[in-house]
Image (tube, helix red, strand yellow):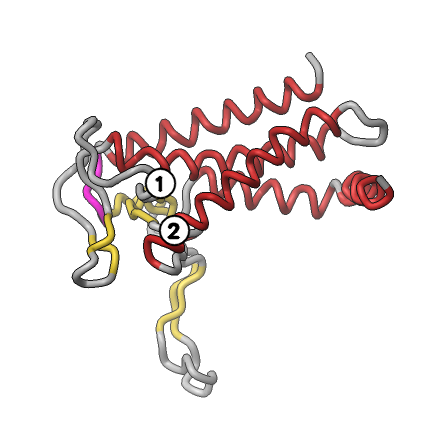
């Protein structure tokens, strides 16, 4: 099997796992429901994210569309780019799979943002009157009636690791006495794929990445 085929197989596996987890969570849990998995250290915590990774968002519906379009462009570039660079000398399997992991993670969240508003009967959606995203009650079901339009679905997040729960010391600037939780953001398998892939390239594939960057600079 060629390296590019391995990369796309890797992307496919990550997407299948990511979407299977998200659909199971969304069709079996209430929004904001938490299920302890490993004591107080790991929970399945169902949230919906209208924007960026790890629960961040900005700019309301317009900002959301810009973000989705940015992700689509990024994925399109990677899909075109991966087969081309996989045939070049000095490019390692690790680097290609790392890029594939980034591509798969971005694509997984694109699917949520683009299509979940069309295929589920309920979900977090923007309320123009209040100027913010509002949740919903009950458990979602797969339904072509939809709860929003194309590109306006929300990303499903579920992994929560509050490994350390304490408070900032009173003398700490701005946050003195406030609650501190590490790791606070709730994320999904696609987010993890992006983060792990970036870290892997930075820690173990920098030489191959530098070779690639130098070639692109002189091309």
The quarter of the picture where residue 111 lies is top left
- Residues packed near mark 1 inside 10 Å, few (<14), some (14 to 19) or many (20 plus): many
Q: How many marks?
A: 2
Q: Is residue 63 magenta?
A: no
Q: Is residue 31 magenta?
A: yes
SS assignment at label 2: helix
Quadrant location, the C terminus: top right
Which residue, as the protein is rendered here, is positioned at the far left?
Answer: 138
Which residue, as the protein is rendered here, is positioned at the far bottom?
Answer: 171
Q: Is residue 81 above or below residue 129?
A: above
Image coordinates for residue 166, horizontal then vertical, percent: 39, 69
Image coordinates for residue 206, horizontal then vertical, percent: 77, 45
**Mark 1 to mark 2: distance in Å?**
8 Å
Q: Relative to 87, is 116 on the left or the right?
A: left
Q: Residue at x 29, y 48 (%)?
A: 47
Q: Nearer the viewer, residue 108 or 164?
A: 108
Q: Relative to 161, is 4 on the left or the right?
A: right
Image coordinates for residue 14, horizontal then vertical, percent: 50, 28
Read off the residue under disc 1: 151
Q: Is residue 155 above or below residue 141?
A: below
The quarter of the picture where residue 179 lies is bottom left
- Residues packed near mark 2 inside 10 Å, few (<14), some (14 to 19) or many (20 plus): many
Number of the label disc, if any, that sits on residue 64: 2
Q: Nearer the viewer, residue 38 or 23?
A: 23
Quadrant location, the N terminus: top right
Q: Residue at x 40, y 69 (%)?
A: 180
* Tags 1 and 2 touching, CB below 8 Å: yes
In the rendered structure, which segment of residues is drawn in magenta? 28-33
From the image, give the main secondary structure of the stretch colored magenta.
loop
Q: Residue at x 43, y 38 (%)?
A: 110
């Amino acid at each position: 099997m060629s390296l590019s085929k391995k990369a796309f197989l890797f992307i496919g596996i990550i997407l299948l796992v990511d979407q299977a987890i998200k659909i199971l969570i969304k069709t079996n849990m209430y929004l904001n429901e938490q299920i302890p998995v490993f004591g107080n250290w790991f929970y399945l915590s169902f949230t919906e994210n209208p924007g960026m990774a790890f629960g961040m968002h900005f700019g309301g519906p317009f900002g959301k569309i810009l973000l989705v379009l940015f992700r689509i462009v990024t994925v399109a570039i990677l899909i075109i780019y991966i087969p081309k660079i996989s045939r070049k000398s000095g490019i390692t399997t690790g680097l290609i799979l790392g890029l594939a992991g980034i591509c798969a993670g971005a694509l997984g969240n694109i699917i949520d943002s683009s299509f979940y508003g069309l295929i589920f009967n309920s979900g977090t959606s923007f309320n123009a009157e209040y100027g913010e995203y509002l949740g919903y009650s009950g458990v979602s079901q797969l339904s072509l009636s939809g709860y929003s339009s194309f590109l306006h679905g929300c990303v499903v997040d579920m992994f929560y690791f509050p490994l350390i729960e304490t408070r900032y010391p009173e003398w700490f600037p701005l946050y003195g006495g406030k609650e501190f939780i590490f790791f606070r953001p709730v994320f999904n398998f696609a987010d993890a794929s992006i983060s792990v892939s970036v870290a892997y390239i930075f820690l173990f594939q920098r030489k191959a990445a530098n070779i690639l960057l130098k070639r692109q600079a002189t091309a």
